[in-house]
Image: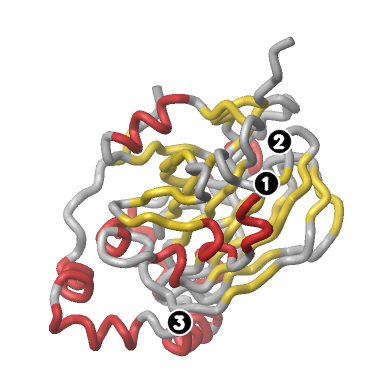
Amino acid sequence: MREIHKEGTPPKSLRFMYRSKWGLPLLRILSGRFVSKLVGKYMDGRLSKHRIKKYVKKNGIDMSEYIEEDYKSFNAFFTRRIKPELRPFDMNPHSFISPCDSKVSAYRITPHSTFEIKGYVYNTQTLLRSAELAAKYEGGLCIVFRLAVTDYHRYFYLDNCEKEDNVFIKGRLHTVQPVALDARKVFAENCREYTVMHTENFGDVTQVEVGAMMVGRISNNHGKGSFSRGEEKGKFEFGGSTIVLLIEKDKLELDEEFFANTQDGNETVVKCGERIGQKKTTKQ
């Protein structure tokens, strides 16, 4: 059994913004893209370097797990690379792996292309802004990987694939903490970038990277092309972030504990490269 993450009490600042009418004006300012761009520029600069030691101490980060280097900015530290041996990838072609370190929730997509998160019903068409693409995932699965600010913020290809071009959708930048998911349709409101991956073993998987409050950039490494399981796909800069995977019907058997934990209101902790399900085979 994997570790379960239970939702804690949200910080007072977030409770004020998302649960108080007086916090709404501040929320409108902080969720604007221009604020995140300004913060991103600062986090890219040398003046942000002094924040690293305090951040490591406050969050109990074990720096011995990461490749040693001289970080020139906070964002260089935030996107630090972990030692490869600490994140081995399951290379069994029938294993479905996590693309990142995260806390996972899992949902079944109804025949009407909808799924419910924290009381809000999402439509895959509004998520992707493409009715044609959304229709591919009717009856399939939606897996949400939430990266907290202390998680490893690089993400990887989950299977050998032919990848389409990235599609960027403008929006705002709400936090992805549960307090915001309770109050807003975050995944349909935030800036996000998606791509369709024609995978070797799991059909056409659409991966959506969702930006969050104070994230400088969603930084994908590649455009259209061929890529291998375990190859780095991209990274999120400063802030918590989310990856949403949409899986076609009858392509994946996700481990049942993910559905059970989600039903109980909990998230399941996973590491990148870890097997979380297997290829669904048709019985003869």
Please tell me the numbered disc located at residue 205.
1
Residue at 46% x, 46% y is: 102
Q: Label 1's element?
A: strand
x, y (%) of residue 253?
A: 57, 26
Relative height, residue 101 to residue 90 (above, below):
below
Residues packed near mark 3 inside 10 Å, few (<14), some (14 to 19) or many (20 plus): many
Task: Describe residue 126's horizontal placement relative to residue 167 as left or right.
Answer: left
Mark 2 and mark 1 in contact? Answer it, CB < 8 Å.
Answer: yes
Please tell me the numbered disc located at residue 83.
none
x, y (%) of residue 73?
A: 53, 76
Residue at 56% x, 47% y is: 100
Q: Is residue 274 visible?
A: yes
Colour scheme of the rendered structure: secondary structure
Gap in angstroms between the C-alphas marked 2 and 1: 7 Å
* Foreground label between 2 and 3: 2
Residue at 48% x, 42% y is: 110
Tally of numbered tags: 3
Please tell me the numbered disc located at residue 36.
3
The amino acid at mark 2 is: Phe
Q: Give the residue at mark 2.
A: 202
- Say which label, 2 or 3, has the lower sequence index: 3
